[in-house]
Amino acid sequence: MSKILPTENQDWGFWGTMREHAAEAWPIAFTAIHNATSTDPVAHAMDMLRSALTRRGTRATGAPRKPREGTKQEVVLAMLRRPEGATVAQIAEATGWAQHTVRGFFAGLKKRQGITVEIAERIRQVGPNKQGAKGSYTVYRVAE
């Protein structure tokens, strides 16, 4: 076994030794932790991991999530729930997202939260005295 570098924590013997000496340091550290605390460090680490994994909120599988307050998601959903709905351009401006990101967000709403976004109205600006395809837009709304 090679020599372990000096550490910041002499009692447990592992702080500052982790780089190329990790293989030698971890067994020493776990033994020192066990001796200092009278607990099994591996069992303690496993208990902490299990606790962290089971602490998640209980939500029925497939049930829609409630958006956090003050998020861009909340802003977009509020815009889509308005009676007049919202266009991709309006949502992109409100959130700072690119237009393709807004459309991807719509797909994610359906897939992850079960919220369907429907087309409320398509405005086509084609023909004489119109702006052409660049002036066309679609109004979206949450399907109720």
Image (cartoon, rainbow, N blue to C red):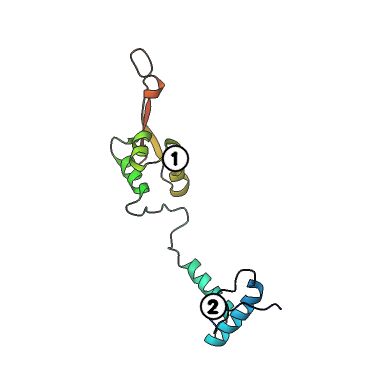
Q: Quadrant of the C terminus?
A: top left
The circle drawn on residue 101 is 1
Q: Position of residue 23 (x, y in %)?
A: 66, 73
Nearest to N terminus: mark 1 or mark 2: 2
Secondary structure of the residue carrying tag 2 is helix
Task: Please tell me how many numbered marks the rendered image carries.
Answer: 2
**Above or below — where is 59 with respect to 18?**
above
Q: Quadrant of the N terminus?
A: bottom right
For the point 36% across and 47% down, which residue is it? 72
The circle drawn on residue 38 is none
Residue 28 sits in which quadrant? bottom right
Q: How far apart are the two marked residues, 1 and 2, measured between alpha carbons?
A: 43 Å
Query: What amino acid type should be assigned to the residue bearing mark 1?
Result: Thr
Q: Residues within 10 Å of mark 2 (few under 14, many from 20)?
A: few
Query: In the displayed image of the protein, which residue is found farthest to the left?
Result: 83
Is 44 situated left or right of 116 in this image?
right
* Residue identifier under label 2: 44
Residue sitting nearer the eye, 136 or 117:
136
Residue 81 sits in which quadrant? top left
Query: In the displayed image of the protein, which residue is found farthest to the right?
Result: 1
Q: Residues within 10 Å of mark 1 (few under 14, many from 20)?
A: few
Residue sitting nearer the eye, 47 or 64:
47
Query: What amino acid type should be assigned to the residue bearing mark 2?
Result: His
Q: Position of residue 8 (x, y in %)?
A: 53, 78
